[in-house]
Image (cartoon, coloured by chain):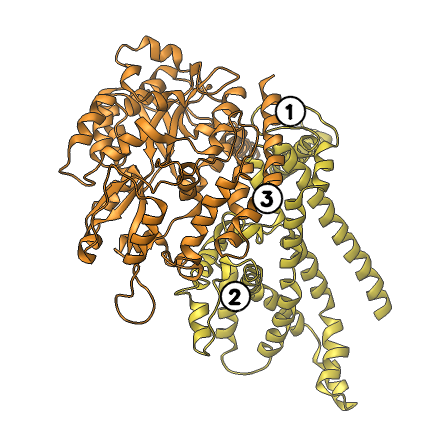
Chain colours: A yellow, B orange
Amino acid sequence: MITKSNLYRKEKIYGYLFILPPILGLLIFTLFPFVYSLYGSFTDWDGLGQMNFIGFDNFKDLFTDELFYKSMYNTLFLMLGIPIGLLLALLLALGLNRKIPGTTTFRVIYYIPVISSLAAVSIMWNWAYNGDYGLVNQFLELFGIKGPNWLMDKDTVKPALILMTVWKGLGYTMLLYLAALQSVSRSYYEAAELDGASGFQMFRNITWPMVKPVTFFLVVTNIIGGSQIFTEMNIMTPTGGPEYSSASIVFYIWDKAFKNLQMGYASAMAMILGIFIFIVTLIQFKMNEKSSFDGD
Amino acid sequence: MIKKKGFAMTMVVLLLMVAALAGCGGGSSSSDGSKELTFMFRGGTDEQKAYKEVIKKFEEEHPGVKVKMVVTAADQYATKLRAAITGNNLPDIFYFAPGDLKAYVNSGVLKDLTPYIEKNKDIKLDNIWKYGVDLYRYDGKMAGQGNIYGMPKDLGPFALGYNKTMFEKAGVPLPDKDKPYTWDEFIKISQELTKDTNGDGKPDQYGTGFNVQWALQAFVWSNGADWLDESKTKVTIDDPKFAEALQYFADMQNKYKITPGIEQSQTLDTYQRWMKGEMAFFPVGPWDMSTFEKLPFEYDLLPFPAGSTGKSATWIGSLGIGVSSKTKYPDEAVELVNYLTTSKEGMKQLVDAKVQIPNLLDMADEWSKDTKTKPNNKQEFIDIVNDYGRALPGNYTYNAEWYDIFFTDIQPVLDGKITAADYVKQEQPKMQKLLDKAVEQEKKSQK
């Protein structure tokens, strides 16, 4: 006996079944670990045995942990690459947006690093930064400069990592900017030209405001991604670099959790990192709301 | 009808997903009904090859048992194992570091092997290095006594090697294998052998090039100092004897220039320089033997130079092979551990492959007397195990964080930017704080 409601019910079941996999995925791989880690951050769990509740002790310890501050500082320092990357990518995108021959080739060249495996890229740069036979120093030698041993010196290891992350992300950022540039209507520029605006004025008053949503998106995602940087240093400086100067916060979390049997403490750090990312993103959204209001 | 089929399909897909999520446990029976064991280990290519052969032989001798081998890179092994434990996905049989013994026993990861070993008449514990077996004993309070939770895969005495061909070419008298160099002698000989051989103004042959993390111990201990006191609860690096040894180590590069400087050493690895015959002295572990067989020069072993105690010192590494407490086939798993660590057949294959020294005393005796194969003075390895080798300081404590940080911060000393005396003063409180934490953690895990 098939009634109308019965039919609907069947469809409902199918519907739920089809959305079940992603929901299950979210529950199992995101929500459950999150809650577990939140609870873990209040315990002295070593990752193996039982969990004893110790309240806020882990968080108190964090405030006096030199390496926590150091790895936090390193992470923030490495984010200097974000504005550099955005600026370079925008310049490149402006260049490639013109009708000159060979742009497709260049676009491909800049995009190749993006699709390459991060591990492979890290290993390649590891060679390039080698003090003796590395590509970077051989290049510097052409100008008579004796390059440092990049990854072994605490003063050069962070700039070296920044250079690499900028290079790796350039293609992706450029592509987004390129798309944004191409969606800007030509009529704005024509009108501006008639009014006698200079190239820079056009960029300032037309291009920059028009690509602003993309810039905003990139800043937010880059900061989130930048806070979680890990693979690069794990491969290039597996002990955290000279005097721990290239260890990021995620690297330190990983170190504590899996090397030193302090899963609870590591969870507490992960919580702080999560809160940090949340706040930074919130501020950016607020700022974006405000400034776009002003602009219009 | 079609709709029904669709529903069935969805269910199948879902079931598959659930199965994929759940189907991660170890120790399953394979389709032909044989018992399958998972063995997780690490090692260089020669070592992997040797172990593959031994496992093949084991499977031949034990029909109905299949062994699945999981190999990981050496520097990632410990992390992968921890992740497997946390994820409740432990292999049946696996290597573990002696330093992790207490944590793994307290949390119930390792199976107590004592009843199985006592039951097995083929195992004669008094024919295996006592030092090796004791590394894997634990009574719930102290390591080194009580029940056995693993068997030593091998013992890794870290000896000093020298390039015999280079000595002969330079007309330098060969070292005496029974009398270690003094520190001064060692510097003098190394300086004689540090040379610019192609006349470009830069030396391309060096006395030595030690990795601080693996070679500093020899100098600290032979000078009568150590990282920890007797009770293993106090960091003792602020001892002047310790600072003296560390300064001596740093001076090799900065003052005596017998080792490649910071720009050269880290880049063209000192290991590679040694392999190319550009280094007079270099540490040699038993696991290196198969690789060093093909060196383009003759090499042999000698004791590390002796500091103020007049006695040479070095460490013995070891890895244990343990069985998961959750394995489905404990009998077969322990059988495999025994085959790899104590059986004549298994041991002979591994020793012949030149990846380790024998675990069995009688076999080791015979092996060390064979002076026809490289290195000639294999007795040095045996002497280290019998007489003067020690465990690395990190082995004694619940975790090695306090010990690791010593090496994380050490670069400025090696570069001559700060003195060893200043360094140990600045570093001791930091290390002590981490050690206190480890002691506290250990106490908590015992209850």
At 44% from the left and 35% from the top, the residue drawn is: B224
Q: Is residue A215 left or right of residue A178?
A: right
Where disc 3 sits, the SS reads helix
Are the residues flagged by discs 1 and 2 from a single subunit?
yes
Residue type indicated by callout 2: Tyr
- On the question of residue B311 being in view, the answer is yes
- Left or right of residue B264, residue B178 in this image: left
The chain letter for the residue carrying disc 1 is A
Identify residue for label 2: A111
**Left or right side of B84 for B331:** left
Residues under labels 2 and 3: Cα distance?
51 Å
Mark 2 touching mark 3, by CB under 8 A?
A: no
Q: Nearer the viewer, mark 1 or mark 2?
A: 1
Q: How many marks?
A: 3
Query: Nearer the N terminus, badge 1 or badge 2?
Result: 1
Residue type of the residue flagged with mark 3: Lys
Numbered mark located on residue A51 in the image = 1
